[in-house]
Amino acid sequence: MSTDQEAPESQVKTESETVNEPPHTELIEHEPTIEELQQALVQAEQKAQENWDKAVRAQAEMENLKRRTQKDLEDAHKFALTGFAKELLPVLDSLVLGLQAATGDSEEVKKFREGSELTIKQFESVFAKFKIEEIDPIGQPFNAELHQAMAMHAVEGAEPNTVVNVFQKGYVLNGRLLRPAMVLVAKAVEKKPEDINSIDEQA
């Protein structure tokens, strides 16, 4: 038997372990350059600015939503009586017309007038309590936002585009129009031909 064949088993195992052992590699850590650090800083600042802008916009949207909600609540409170008030106006109109039509000196007429006047005053008191204001624009300039012109008429001594008669009073609730006043509006008086000739002769 040869010497190679008689090699101890421990020596064979050691050589086998040496062959199977993976090679050892050392990891070299990369150190960032100044340029890379500066670029990373710029990107971080941009990201921070973007996040800040988003936060500011979100805050502004929340404030706007809060204001809109508050205004909606205030409007709902201020104008909750709009429908009810509109229904009351014809009732008050009927009382006023009935009072105007009640003529005569009989006791029945007097009692009717007294009762109507008292009821109208109660209406006016309730209207004032709930900020329902009357529009009675006689002698005032015509306002298309508050008045409805039923006709135009030339009136001596009246400024053109002024209200010379009110057929039906208007009303506003907390500044919002409930019903426009129905009015007659003055227009410029047309000059007669003889007036024009007289002016020419004087010139």
Image (cartoon, rainbow, N blue to C red):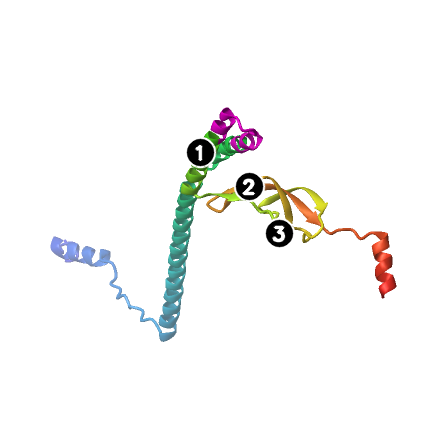
Q: Identify residue for label 2.
A: 170
Observer-nearest of 45 and 17: 45
Name the side, left or right, on which 78 lies relative to 157: left
| Residue 80 belongs to the span the image colors magenta | no
Question: Label 2, label 1: how many angstroms apart (C-alpha)?
Answer: 21 Å
Secondary structure mostly seen in the magenta stretch:
helix
Q: Secondary structure at mark 3?
A: loop
Name the side, left or right, on which 57 lies relative to 98: left
Q: Identify residue for label 3.
A: 141
How far from the left and from the top, in percent, is residue 107? 49, 25
Residue at point 45% right, 37% down?
121
Observer-nearest of 72 and 113: 113
Name the side, left or right, on which 10 lies relative to 63: left
Callout 3 crowding tier (Cα within 10 Å): few <14, some 14–19, many ≥20: some
How far from the left and from the top, in percent, is residue 176? 50, 44
Residue at point 63% right, 47% down?
163
**Chain-order first, disc 2 or disc 3:** 3
Q: Secondary structure at mark 1?
A: helix
Q: Quadrant of the C terminus?
A: bottom right
How far from the left and from the top, in percent, is residue 168? 59, 38
Q: Identify residue for label 1.
A: 118
